[in-house]
Image (cartoon, helix red, strand yellow):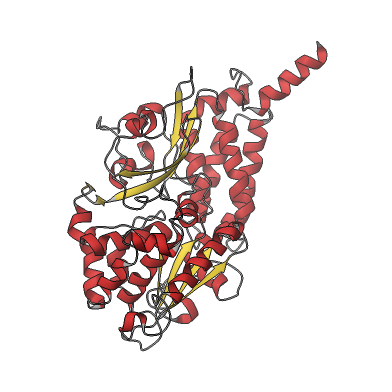
């Protein structure tokens, strides 16, 4: 069932005229006849959870906003999609910009906010221009600006590009950047719902979360809650990439099995010919890696489902996270050590430097993984890596430190034999491995 990508194949669906003909902005007309708190309750009933990674119930998040302070309230769309392996928000904004604008209008009304911002990743400037065009079309047709549809409700939406910093995907660092300051995460409390943008009550939601709101208002929260499984209600976008036949963005009803998602022709289409599954990273680079036996089944023997609960079953010992939906598949030609080192390079580069454990520790992680991958590893390096992760995880202002550690700790947990084979120089040939590239180069030279 497609909710977010329903009209994806319609020509010129990114224009107001075509989008409107297909029922676009009907949820705005309906919501503006409701009380703001009734809109909040409808989203609560739907069971919609934050699609940016945390999975926090959206309606509950809205209900926390301080409505009594007398200060302006703000809605901020987090479109700073920087998680490696994740590109579904970019896809939504590029193909269906009016769906996000419509969702933001309804959500802003629910929060009684009159100013909203889309904080978009700096590398996506051309999509920012598409959003600007969609916003201008909404203004021109009376869905933004003063006295929207004659209801007395006013709203302005602005697009604000970042400067390419992954840390600005963290909501408080995003707010700092939006205020014109350096993007450094804030200490909490106070939380944004009390003191967010310009020290005013603020709600920050992900692109996909806000884009789901129009359907919920049009069809009802109960109808949305019936889709999916249990607390994992509705549909979810996944960015599928890696060594599969059909990389792309897929909308699924939550509750299908992970195995079906990988091998079904409807979705990823399986692995390349002659390859076997080695690992899956289900929620973007910061989520723990799963070996094949934990991809198909949980530790308790239940089929592994594409839901928040099933993917996290077993904790980090035998589970992972749904995260941001960046679904990365690795086959038997992939080198786990090289992949883990590559992620560590990213997190070292993107650390904001505010907290010592993260600023120093991510560099140490990268150095140790570099030497293991390049044939200079030491027997004590695996214990050293795990010790460093324990000194970072949970000891920083934001969760960036944890995000840098989880891929490494889980890779060592499930693929310790591969790390040891690199250190002992007994690893079988792997296409993506530096050790063997160097050995092959030397062999060719001598030959």
For image coordinates 31% across by 47% down, the residue present is 2
Q: Quadrant of the C terminus?
A: top right
From the top left corner, tell me how far across and down residue 438 is, in percent.
Answer: 73, 24
From the top left corner, tell me how far across and down residue 424 is, in percent.
Answer: 62, 22
The answer to whether residue 165 is seen in the rendering is no
Q: Is residue 71 left or right of residue 309?
A: right
Q: Nearer the viewer, residue 433 or 368?
A: 433
**Residue 306 sits above or below residue 301 on the image:** below
Q: Nearer the viewer, residue 330 or 239?
A: 239
For image coordinates 40% across by 87% down, the residue present is 71
The residue positioned farthest toward the top in the image shown: 447
**Residue 350 sits above or below residue 369 on the image:** below
Q: Quadrant of the N terminus?
A: top left
For image coordinates 30% across by 73% down, the residue present is 64
From the top left corner, tell me how far across and down residue 14 is, in percent.
Answer: 46, 58
**Residue 197 sits above or below residue 406 on the image:** below
The answer to whether residue 121 is seen in the rendering is yes
The residue positioned farthest toward the bottom in the image shown: 70
Q: How many labels does the image show?
A: 0
From the top left corner, tell me how far across and down residue 180 is, in percent.
Answer: 60, 75
Q: In this view, does 310 lie to the left or right of 359?
A: left
**Residue 356 sits above or below residue 257 on the image:** below
Q: Is residue 34 left or right of residue 101?
A: left
């Amino acid at each position: 069932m497609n909710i977010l990508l329903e009209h994806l194949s319609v020509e010129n669906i990114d224009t107001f005229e075509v989008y409107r003909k297909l029922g676009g902005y009907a949820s705005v007309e309906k919501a503006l006849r409701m009380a703001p708190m009734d809109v909040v309750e409808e989203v609560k009933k739907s069971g919609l959870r934050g699609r940016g990674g945390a999975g926090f119930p959206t309606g509950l998040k809205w209900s926390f906003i301080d409505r009594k302070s007398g200060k302006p309230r703000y809605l901020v769309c987090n479109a700073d999609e920087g998680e490696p392996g994740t590109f579904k928000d970019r896809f939504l904004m590029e193909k269906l910009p009016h769906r996000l604008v419509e969702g933001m209008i309804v959500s802003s009304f629910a929060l009684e906010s009159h100013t909203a911002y889309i904080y978009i990743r700096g590398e996506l400037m051309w999509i920012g221009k598409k959003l600007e065009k969609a916003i201008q079309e909404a203004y021109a047709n009376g869905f933004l600006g003063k006295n929207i549809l004659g209801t007395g409700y006013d709203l302005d939406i602005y697009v604000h590009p970042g400067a390419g910093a992954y840390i600005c995907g963290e909501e408080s660092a995003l707010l700092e950047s939006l205020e014109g300051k350096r993007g450094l995460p804030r200490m909490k409390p106070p939380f944004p719902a009390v003191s967010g943008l310009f020290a005013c009550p603020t709600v920050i939601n992900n692109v996909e979360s806000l884009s789901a709101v129009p359907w919920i208002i049009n069809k009802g929260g109960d109808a949305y809650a019936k889709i999916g499984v249990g607390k994992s209600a509705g549909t979810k976008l996944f960015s599928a990439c890696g060594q599969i036949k059909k990389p792309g963005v897929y909308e699924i009803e939550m509750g299908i099995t992970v195995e079906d998602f990988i091998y079904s022709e409807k979705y990823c289409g399986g692995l390349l010919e002659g390859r076997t599954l080695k690992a899956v990273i289900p929620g973007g680079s910061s989520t723990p890696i799963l070996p094949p036996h934990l991809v198909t089944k949980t530790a308790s023997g239940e089929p592994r489902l594409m839901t928040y609960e099933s993917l996290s079953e077993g904790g980090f010992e035998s589970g992972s996270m749904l995260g941001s939906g960046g679904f990365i598949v690795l086959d038997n030609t992939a080198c786990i050590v090289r992949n883990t080192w590559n992620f560590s390079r990213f997190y070292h580069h993107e650390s904001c430097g505010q907290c010592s454990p993260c600023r120093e520790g991510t560099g140490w992680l990268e150095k140790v993984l570099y030497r293991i991958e390049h044939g200079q590893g030491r027997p004590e390096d695996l214990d050293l890596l795990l010790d460093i992760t324990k000194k970072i995880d949970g000891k920083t202002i934001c969760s960036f430190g944890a995000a840098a550690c989880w891929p490494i700790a889980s890779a060592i947990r499930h693929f310790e034999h591969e790390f040891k084979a690199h250190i002992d120089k007994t690893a079988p040939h792997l296409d993506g491995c530096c050790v063997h590239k160097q050995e092959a180069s030397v062999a060719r030279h001598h030959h």
